[in-house]
Image (cartoon, rainbow, N blue to C red):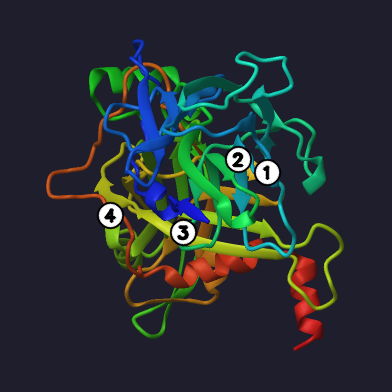
Amino acid sequence: MSVLDTSVDDFAGEELPEYTPTSPREPHEHVNSLFNKNSRPWVTLRLLSDAPAGNKFPVYYDGGAVQGSVQIRLESPQTIRSVIVEASKTGVHICFYLIITFIKVEGVLHLPSAYDIPPLWHERKKLWDASGGFEPQSIRSSGEWSWDFHFPIPTHFDNTINGGLPQTRLPGNFSLRPYTGFMQYRVLLFVKRGKYLSDLVELQTLFSYIARERAPPPSPLRELAYYQGSTAPGPEVDPDGWKACDIINTKGIIFGDRVVNLVYRPFLANPTIYPRGGTIFYRIEVSGGDPQALDLLSSPSAITVLLTRQVECKRFRGPTPRGRDDCDVDVHAIAQGVPWTITSPQEGDDTRFLEGEIHIPPGTCSSVAITPIQLNYSVTFVVTAAGFTPHDRNTVISRNPIRVVSHPALGIKPISRLPPGYEQNVTHHQTRADWALEIVRSMLRPRDTLNSQSMFV
């Protein structure tokens, strides 16, 4: 078998367009061919897409269609009985002394589950056969033939086979590295020439599918600040522009034996739906009755703010076997916030204020919620002040779910408010709050799984 293979790792490095083109773009052609012994193409697969010129892979949006053509060029007389365009998980047609050509177009979810997951989307369409209902009625001589195909991409699919909903939104491409899971879309061209299975050759092209979703608009006061290029007003002035997060009541010891009790009130820019490549603005109010402890525990280095990615994958379609985990949980930090101290009219001897922002990496995948997998994001605040020992580490974490979508809100794009000398951090290394990720994992692990584990300790 001759296979031209393109791996998902190759595709993961491809730059995807962040926004829908504002004006019509000339369709870009992507060509793959199989070559004969004279190094000339005898089968060619062409795909047309809205991908920018130079993109290695085609790009399609929801509401669009996978379209292209198949061309066969024979330099010597041969017999062709059928040409079929197909989108399905399996289906190798074995015939004797024939050339059979068909295409699979599929969206496949690859996960480390204990059961096979059928393609989320697949179809089949016959382009030509020798039954007499197509033109030409036979192909027996040397020459050149071409057939067009067109597959509308559905926005939803039936996920009941996996325990999901009959109307589940078709997700875009995603890669969960280093977790072993990814969503892949591809067009495969199979050609069988001869009577043996070894005569089957394969040609495939991966493509990007982008399920478009736009972030909602900010509050009027926040939008006005973006337009003026000024700092957005705080939650005391614009309560609609901020989402109050889970409060952290911090109890612990500093300087070896000094007991302190502080309260952290974090806020996130509202709505908490952000575009990939966008910015998450946050604010933290710190209060306490010990001025010295307050100065120490309200400094920008005293609290770590992480953008975390949580992957939860169901491992079994049916009941979970006794003593086995039903769900894989993977938690990673993908970006780290940059905070700075600010002054506020509400500031007093017992209150301090911080502002900060997190840049969402442009290649971040949109949030996904389809059985058996959920890809979610959270902004996690963790008290990590040097010299501070909490009574209970579980109480110094505030995890706040957000959603990541493909497109920004319409209107003025917010600009970074980072003070000079500050820079954003993308976490490719350990942080001082890595221990907090383990606590988040334990929060996400199903309770019955924990109980079943304890039975077998």
Which residue was labeled with disc 4? 425
Q: Position of residue 48 (x, y in %)?
A: 42, 23
Residue contact between numbered discs 1 and 3, judged by CB atoms under 8 Å: no
Neighbour tally class for label 4: few under 14, some 14-19, many 20 plus, Cα within 10 Å: some
What crowding class fits label 3: few (fewer than 14 Cα within 10 Å), some (14-19), or many (20 or more)?
Answer: few
The Cα–Cα distance between marks 4 and 3, rounded to whole angstroms, is 19 Å
Eye-nearest disc, 4 or 3: 3
Q: Are marks 2 and 1 in contact (CB under 8 Å)?
A: yes
Q: Are marks 4 and 2 in contact (CB under 8 Å)?
A: no
Q: CA distance from mark 2 to mark 3?
A: 18 Å
Nearer to us of marks 2 and 3 is: 2
Whether residue 84 is visible: no
- Residue at 47 percent of width and 73 percent of height: 435
Front in this rendered view, residue 442 or 355: 442
Rendered image: mark on residue 107:
2
Mark closest to the chain's N terminus, 4 or 1: 1
Front residue of 128/355: it is 128
Q: Earlier in the sequence, mark 4 or mark 3?
A: 3
Q: Earlier in the sequence, mark 1 or mark 3?
A: 1
Answer left or right for 383 relative to 331. Answer: left
Quick one: label 4 or label 2, which is nearer the N terminus? 2
Q: Quadrant of residue 99?
A: top right
Is residue 156 positioned above or below 301 on the image? above
Residue 128 as seen in the image, left or right of residue 45: right
At numbered mark 2, what does the secondary structure look like: helix, strand or loop? strand
Q: Which mark is residue 119?
A: 1
Q: Does residue 240 sit above or below 332 in this rendering?
A: above
